[in-house]
Amino acid sequence: MTLRVLLACLFSLFATASRAEEPALKKAIFAGGCFWCMDAEFRGTLGVVGVVSGYTGGTVENPTYEQVATGKTGHAEAIEITYDPTKISYPQLLDIYWSNIDPTDAGGQFADRGSQYRSEIFYLDEEQHKQAQASKIAKQARLNTDIATVISPASTFYKAEDYHQDYAHKNPTQYNLYKYASGRAKRLEELNK
């Protein structure tokens, strides 16, 4: 066996072994008002590999921001999180979610009104469904009030336009003005005391 063949075999063996050790990534989908704010709260979290802003829960295929903004497509602004379950669990993602929405508001979130800004958890399997239900019950007990956040099976997730992706990082001044002017920051402080 030549050295070249031996090295190729070793490289192939190591490449296969390293791929086998990579964890299987999972996804989570949450709607909590403006997707810029939801994206900002999850991006950079240990174990979160990626966050995509988009639309889900509606009836129109490939909706645009302008269509969703009318509130007539049935979609919610949402985020799709890709995460490493060996570093962060779905219940931990739910904890972050609950601390960044007003779960008592059935008409939208903060200054953003309408069904396109609703709070909703879109589960991808039965385990996520059970964990989301348990977390909702716990949040309701902690707040001692009814929770308006809905838990639904996931439907097609459509990526939003590029200018919506990682908005807080690309436009920090506009994002911070929005976050405070919308009442989001103040209300979250009240809810998370």
Image (tube, rainbow, N blue to C red):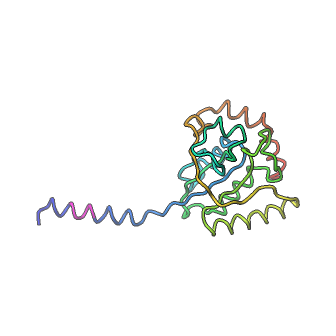
Report if residue 172 lies within the magenta region.
no
Residue in front for this viewpoint, 6 or 39: 39
Q: Quadrant of residue 67?
A: top right
Query: Residue 157: image x %, image y %?
Result: 58, 50
Query: Residue 47: image x %, image y %?
Result: 56, 56
Q: Quadrant of the N terminus?
A: bottom left
Please, which residue is most extreme toward the right here?
Answer: 144
**Region of the chain picked out in magenta, as a range:** 8-12
Query: Residue 109: image x %, image y %?
Result: 78, 45
Predominant secondary structure, magenta span: helix
Please, which residue is most extreme toward the left here?
Answer: 2
Q: Quadrant of residue 71?
A: top right
Q: How many marks?
A: 0
Residue 23, relative to residue 97: is it above or below? below
Residue 43, relative to residue 139: is it above or below? above
- In the picture, measured across the screen, residue 40 lies left or right of residue 111, that is left
* Residue in view at x 69 percent, y 57 percent: 121
Residue in front for this viewpoint, 140 or 189: 140
Residue 162, relative to residue 89: is it above or below? above
Q: Quadrant of residue 10?
A: bottom left
Residue in front for this viewpoint, 46 or 171: 171
Query: Residue 125: image x %, image y %?
Result: 60, 66
- In the picture, measured across the screen, residue 2 lies left or right of residue 13, that is left
